[in-house]
């Protein structure tokens, strides 16, 4: 049985972080350096094994040139990312 592609609204925080990072053609290492964190920590966020703090989410949104609304709720409007 084939599964349908996940809609933007059904994605988790981690998959939205990964999607935004990949859309910007950034590696985990490059984004982690921008955020002054470890690549392992970023990997845990993308796998939903950990949740970044609010200030870190704000820094992520800035580093990924997207909105907090996109990262947290999956709203694409104003995120700079294709739907």
Image: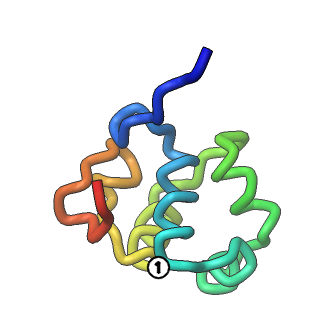
Q: Is residue 14 above or below residue 78?
A: above
Task: Report the residue at 32% width, 54% height from top.
Answer: 70
Q: Name the quadrant of the N terminus.
A: top right
Residue marked by disc 1: 63
Left of 2 or right of it: where is 36? Answer: right
* Depth order, front residue of 51/20: 20
Left of 80 or right of it: where is 64? Answer: right
When asked about the image quadrant of residue 42, the answer is: bottom right
Q: Is residue 19 above or below residue 50?
A: below
From the top left corner, tell me how far across and down residue 25 is, in percent.
56, 79
Q: Is residue 30 above or below residue 19?
A: below
Task: Report the residue at 60% width, 85% height from top.
Answer: 34
* Depth order, front residue of 27/40: 27
Residue projecting furthest to the top: 1
Task: Report the residue at 45% width, 34% height from top.
Answer: 6
Left of 62 or right of it: where is 27? Answer: right
- Look at the numbered disc 1 and give the secondary structure of its residue: helix
């Amino acid at each position: 049985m084939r599964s349908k592609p996940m809609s933007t609204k059904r994605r988790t925080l981690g998959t939205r972080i990964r999607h935004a990072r990949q859309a910007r053609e950034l590696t985990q290492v490059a984004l982690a350096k921008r955020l002054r964190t470890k690549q392992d920590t970023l990997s845990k966020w993308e796998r939903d094994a950990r949740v970044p703090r609010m200030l870190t989410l704000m820094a992520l949104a800035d580093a990924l040139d997207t909105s907090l609304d996109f990262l947290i709720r999956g709203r694409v409007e104003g995120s700079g990312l294709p739907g």
